[in-house]
Every structure is written in C-alpha cells, then in structure tokens.
Image (spheres, rainbow, N blue to C red):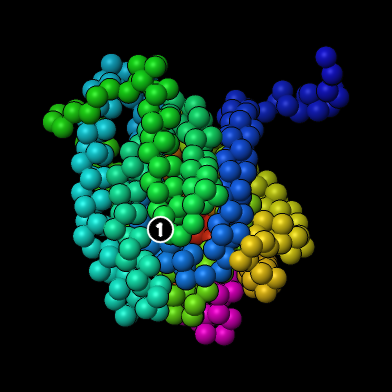
Amino acid sequence: MIQLPKWLQARLDRLGSDHKQLARGLLLVGFFVLVGKFAGAAKEMAVAWRYGVSETVDAYLFVFNLVQWPIAIVAGVIGAVLVPLAARLRQEAPQDTPGFRSELLGGTLLVGLCLGIGAWLFLPWLVQQPWVGLNPGQADLAGQMATWLAWVLPLAIIARLLAAWTMAANRHLNTLLEGAPALAILVAVLLMGGTEPLIWGTLAGFAIQVLLLFLPLALRGEAEAPVFVFRSRHWRPFFAGFGLMLVGQGLMSLVDIIDQFFAARLGTGALSTLGYSTRVLSLILGLGTIAIGRAALPVLSRTHAEGRAGIERTAIQWAGLLFGIGILIMTIGFWLSPVIVELLFERGRFTGDDTERVMGLLRYAVLQVPFYFASIILSYALLSQQRYREIMMLATVSVVVKLVLASVLVPFLGLAGLLLATAGVYFVSGMLMVWVLRRQ
C-alpha cells in the first residue's frame, strides 16, 4: 500500500469530521456529476449537429426554460427545506418518517399535476404573444412544443422529490441519474429528424429518471404509496420554511428567465447562441456546483441538527478554497473556449461562424465561475441552519442587481452584457452571505 508523506498524513488527521465528510462527498458526487455531464455534452453535440443555431433550437430553449422555471422553484424549495428537516427527523422522530414521506409524495403529485395542466393551457398562448419577442416562425414552433413539454412539469417535480429523499440519506445516486433526460434526447435526436426528438426525448428522459429513482428507494423500503390526507405533525416545520423559500427561490430563478426575455429581443439565433454558451458553462460548473451542494447540505444539516458549532467557519473556509479553484477553472476555460466550442458543436448545421459567436460569449460566461463556486457553499450553510428569511432577502437583492446590470450592459454589449450581469449577481450575493455568516 502506498504511504502518504508524514506531513500530509498529519495534516489530514487534523481535519475535523465535517471537513472529512465534505471532502468524501465532493469526490463521490463529483464522479457522478462527471458521468452525467458527459451525457449532457454528447446530447449538446447531437443537437448542434442536427439543428445548429436555428429557430428550432430558439423555440425549444425558450419553452423548456419557461417550463424549468416552476420546476426550479418547487424543486429548490423541496430540497432546501426537506434535507435539513429529514436530518432532524432521523435524529428526533425516525418513526414518523414513513408517514410523512407518503403524504409528501401525495402532495407533490397534486402540485405537479396542477402545474402541468396550467402550463398545458397557458404556455401555447403565452409564446404567441408579440410582447414576448419571438418572431412568427419561432412563435409557431414554440406553441407546438409547449403543448407537449408542459407535461415535463409533473415528471420533473416528482423526480426532484425522490432525488431530495435520496440526498437526505447522504446517498448520491440521484446525481448520476440526472443524465437520463440528456441520454434520451441524444438517442431521439440521432434516430429521428424534425422537432419530435426534442419533445419525446425530453418527456421519455424525465419518465425514465423518475422510475430509476423510485426503484432503489422502494427496494430499501423508503418509498411508500402516496397519501392525499395530510395529517403529519411535521407539516408545520416544513411549511415554516416553505413560504419564505418559495419566494426566495422564485426570485433567484428569475435571473435565468430575465435572460430569456432580454435575448428574445436581440434577433433570430440570439437564444440559441446564448443557450449553447450557457450549456457549455453548465458543463464546467456542474462538476463543482452540484458536488458542492449535494455533498455539503446533508453534512451541514446533520451538524446543525446535532447542535454542534462551527458551520459558519467551515463554510467560509471552503468558500475561499472553492473561489481559488474557480479562478483556475475560469482561466483555463477562457483560453480553451475556442477548442471547447469547436470540439463540442462544429459539425453538421453548426458552422464556423456559429463557433465564433458562441466562443465569444463563453469567454464572458466563465467570469462568473469563481463567484458562483464560493456562493454555493455559503448558501448551503444558511440553508442548513434554516435561515430562510436571510435567503429571501438575498434573493431579492440578486434580482434587483440582475435587472439593473442587464438594463445598463445589454444595450452596449448585447448578450455579453447578460453574462456579465450574472457574474455581478454572484459577486454581490457572495459578499453579502459572508457578511451574514460572520455576524452569526
């Protein structure tokens, strides 16, 4: 067996248990994220080959991002409130967990179906409105897609609930299975033409994800049948944070929606160009950000539930480390952006001119990486302590900063101004979170 140097072994031995669990979780989740991101990259390559920068991709991304908005809100609230609550349940009342789980599944099913029906009725009308900014061709395609993509809502929300239960138990299979929708879209795009692969691949992918998340939970006896009568005494602490987090998550998710409406007014291809650059950025960010959040929240929540101190210091120390890692990734991403975009996308209907446009945007996009990395661990420190009021206030500030910066920068810089505005949001929110944690 290989022996570590004595000085390194001594340093590792001095690490606290929270640091060790965080590091172990980061490595495991990071591996799963890497696998999922490979699936996502393959899907993006296939979409670029089949559709290029076109009205089809503009319409799909516009509708899909609108559908993702309520999903991000509900899923973010469920994860943020449920994981700390589950840690407390295991500590204080483990016998109540099955009943609360079945009621929560029933409630989530009802919410998902209501949102799906609402989107099915409302979205096809919305995307046709002139004030949205889509041209007639984009609007017609978006209306056709919206009728079907509305049903992603119930599937994705159930998947997020099952993922939160998995993560609450400090297991990370949910991260690996997030690649299922991308794989389904990849297969559909390779086998079929037209808009149907994007629609049916998306729906099939989320259905497969729900099934693959449910089966392991059922085998461990952690997936009860849904119940639609809500009597558990744990609804009160759940809803104590739900309202504030719903407002906060809704405000934070507006940052991405703001991008869609600003970009829709910049002409045909603007949404696709922005979409390709942010997809590459998500491949860069995902390995770090998902790993950070999903490794950190269960550990920090358990620390808080057990009444141990030091969460603030641990989070700020990790934020500094992750900021440094983000600087390194930002530098590499800036210099390699032409190679990354050409390697991923330049084939089929995606031309060299498209590569130039996406590469230029990507260089602005990577500026947010260090600020985002640091802010993730800081936000999960606040969530683990159930400090929902502070999170809501920070979300409000973030939306205001985004609107102000986008309004100032977009007229001069176009799409690049949107990406610089997002970097500004993460910088301001990160500084405010450090201040809030230091006060504690």
Residue 364 spot, x, y in % from top left: 64, 68
Mark 1 Cα-neighbour bin, 10 Å: few <14, some 14–19, many ≥20: some
Residue 186 spot, x, y in % from top left: 54, 47
Residue under pointer 1: 64
Relative side of 263 to 345, left or right? left
Which quadrant would the N terminus be assigned to in this image?
Answer: top right
Pick the front one: 363 or 432: 363
Q: Can the viewer see residue 342 in this picture?
A: yes
Q: Can the viewer see residue 281 in this picture?
A: no
Chief SS of the magenta region: helix
Whether residue 113 is situated above or below residue 393 in the rendered picture = above
The amino acid type found where label 1 is placed reads: Phe
Q: Quadrant of the rendered structure where residue 81 is?
A: top left
Give the residue at x 42% y 66%.
59
User: Which region shows up in magenta?
Assistant: 404-420
Relative side of 394 to 330, left or right? left
Q: Is residue 415 magenta?
A: yes
Whether residue 302 is situated above or below residue 111 in the rendered picture = above
Mark 1: secondary structure = helix
